Image (cartoon, rainbow, N blue to C red):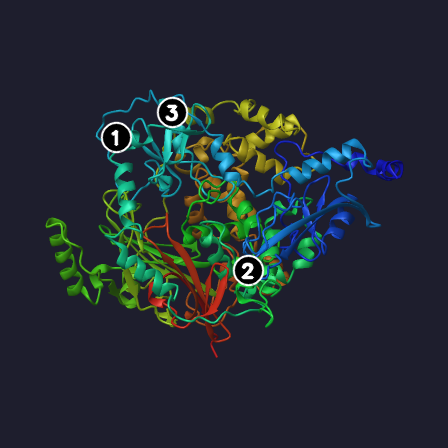
Amino acid sequence: MAADLGELLVPYMPTIRVPKTGDRVFKSECAFSFDSPESEGGLYVCMNTFLGFGREHVERHYRKTGQSVYMHLKRHVKEKATGAAGGAIPRRRNGKVFLDLELNRDFNGEDYEYEDEAKLVIFPDHFEIPLPNIEELPALVTIACDAVLNAPSAYKKPEPESWEEEIQVSRHARSLRQLDNGVRIPPSGWKCQKCEMRENLWLNLTDGTLLCGKWFFDGSGGNGHALEHYRATNHPLAVKLETITPDGADVYSFEEEEAVLDPQISDHLAHFGIDMLQMLQKRTENGHHTDNNARPRVSEWEVIQESGMKLKAVFGSGYTGIKNLGNSCYLGTVVQVLFSIPDFQRMYVGNLQRIYDYSPLDPSQDFATQMAKLGQGLLSGQHSKPPMKSELIEQHQQKGISARMLKALVGRGHPEFSSNRQQDAHEFLLHIINLVERNSAGSENPSDVFRFLVEERIQCCQSRRVRYAERVDYCIQLPAPIEAATNREELLAYETKRRDAEENMKAPPEPVRARIPFTACLQAFTEPDNVPDFWSSALQAKSAGVKTSRFASFPEYLIVQVKKFTFGVDWVPKKLDLAIDVPDFLDLNRLRATGLQAGEEELPDLMPPIVLPEDTRDNSMGSVDSPEIDEVAVMQLAEMGFPLEACRKAVYYTGNMGPEMAFNWIIAHMEEPDFAEPLALPSMMDPGPSISDSPMGAATPLANSPPEESIAILTSMGFPRSHSIQALKATNNNLERALDWIFTHPEEEESDVLSDMADTEPNDNAFSNANSHSDSTLSPDRETSGPRVKDGPGRYELFAFISHMGASTMSGHYVCHIKKEGRWLIYNDHKVCLSERPPKDLGYIYFYHRLSSS
């Protein structure tokens, strides 16, 4: 028999691998479904890729890859036998539990026992070889089987922990010299000191300069001013502002070219007025376990979770919960709301078979596949079945599904979402929308339903002239003006009592929650704002300016975030304790943009002077025959196995912005026929415009071709590629200014292309006329230059909201309420129940759908 098995396996031996260090063995969950070894059909693990597949999907993988040998894993869950007294009969530890899997928490481990079964299965004949079978199997196969059985599950030890362990202490940390220049960093209002960027800001720990980082593959980033500053000063360490918490911060060493640890980070930040020790003390005081502040937080937890009420559990399609993986409720609530929207259902669940059939060889790393898998799990009803009458209720609580595979994928490379810490649900929502955008190129884009245009009217206070511009947005952020609270006197009395209690060491008074009318929030949103550092083209100088915002289009689904979180003067993130009477129906038509009005005079269409660093200016006048290319980045890519010339092109066309950006360029262009051919610069054949021809007389670096990543970001928003390149060239590759340029310089040559797009995508609507109040319509005069929007009336109905409990986004818990079939439901991790009293006044993010005009 041994010889027979050996001969049987000989043709497949080259495809059987032994897992190496770094290989992840997916033996706890299917890549396409939520099947596991505990499922009825068990799980099949490919002995070459170590991916796991349920019985329904293993044939697809076999047909696509030709891999024939799989290990079938099956875990049998049995109820322990009970003795005469009714208790479980004592037993020794079951020797048949050999899979390194997390025990199913849906069963009480004391009342159940597990038996594991493993066997090799050879496709397509489904020939089975029971394991272990040391005597009869070839040595290589035995070693491979043992390694798979003993390997930890792919997610047993989360990736972020191993990633964090690899970060080394910077050699500059202990000897860092900090300039005594009096710089103090405020807790809000940050902006890059060289451009208008207000995100991805890095604080240089030597001199306190605040500058933007680079653009990253996830859409975040800036214009690289922090790196430019290092090259000019050699100040090595910088910290990302948004990551500063009592537990630490993300520190980067420009000289070492990697993320590093700074054991003195608390002292280094204190030098610029950021007290981490005080932040930690405040967080401890604000926690809901502390006596001093327990009552408001406990009350909030009880109200939002509807504690104390007998909530009725619901089961079936659309009523499946999501297990909390430990501070992952921010993800669960966001995707529950997204998959209650028909466009997301249609894109990912309606196209399920097509997505699965065309998925890459590793579906665990494919965004569309993992979104389809999660959507199918939520909407199929397979994981939300009511208990049988004969079954014990405690044994069959709602189980929910695990979004572990999607969480690992969408968090990859992201410093916040790759961690196991609690995160801001609003930031994650925008992150997911960004990923949907980037992964929907050339296909239906479900996030179109959120996209709308904002008209910004800026007026120069001195000349009284105005400028109108449009920008894309996905969410409106409503301020919460405490001064407009209807119980203001009660709040003032509470504050007086609280201060008196602090001074006299008394127990704090009963907290009072501010009650703010929704109309006051909306009024604050529409009030004019001062424009910092406004440059008036009429005066050719900086001046005072005010900005007002209106809707140039209304989205099909409106996201409203209430700005409940703020930073105190001590840099501690705080949550405002307030309630807002959010309406079920909302009419925003009065906020429709009107454009230039009679009697208004426009500001001249002039751009501020572009001031380039000296080294950039020198390089722009240098010979184009020898372009500057970061050879270190080239060699890093070449070591990965890519052709050398392709690596050089990737680094050049991404503007020497680093190997990660260049790697993305390679992935996007590796199928092109000239991928590995030598770099041929357009300027060698066409000199192009001279320096005197460029805007404001300033040359732009790499003017021949803006970075591909910047082009991709603009095209993913719906702008034509040629127009995006033109905008980037005209604005020195500044993405924020390029967006403004696109709206003020309509493209005239793309109408035919976009009309074809409108023919092939009848459900997508481009810009509608800003003064039109009809249902979603196409407007040819605006569709040629802007992103796809689904304009229509500004009348909405509330259908979902996400609520947060806790003192700050760094802690606490999220739940969501969704209205389905006329009933409000509460989704609290894996539990889904009918809501008795949906706490609409305590929500954080609200979701409205547009009402039809009929």
State which mark lies toward you, 2 or 3: 2
Q: Which amino acid does label 1 sit on?
A: His
Residue 237 is situated, as x and y percent measured from the top left of the image, at 37, 27
Q: Residue at x 67, y 44 (%)?
A: 51
SS for callout 3: loop
Q: Nearer the viewer, residue 615 or 230?
A: 230
Q: Residues within 10 Å of mark 3 (few under 14, many from 20)?
A: many
Q: Which residue lies furthest to the bottom in this view?
A: 854
Q: Would you name the residue on which mark 3 appears?
A: 236
Q: Distance between the residues labelled 2 and 3?
A: 50 Å
**Whether residue 140 can be seen here:** yes
Q: Which residue is drawn at 35% across and 71% down?
A: 583
SS for callout 1: loop
Q: Would you name the residue on which mark 2 appears?
A: 399
Q: Would you name the residue on which mark 1 appears?
A: 271
State which mark lies toward you, 3 or 1: 1
Residue 682 is situated, as x and y percent measured from the top left of the image, at 59, 32
Q: What residue type is labelled 2?
A: Lys
Left or right of 44? Residue 388 is left
Q: Is residue 742 above or below residue 518?
A: above
SS for callout 2: loop
Residue 787 is situated, as x and y percent measured from the top left of the image, at 50, 55
Q: Residue 167: give its label.
A: none
**Whether residue 627 can be seen here:** no
- The answer to whether marks 3 and 1 mark residues whose Cβ atoms lie closer than 8 Å is no
Q: Which amino acid does label 3 sit on?
A: Pro
- To which quarter of the image does residue 674 belong? top right
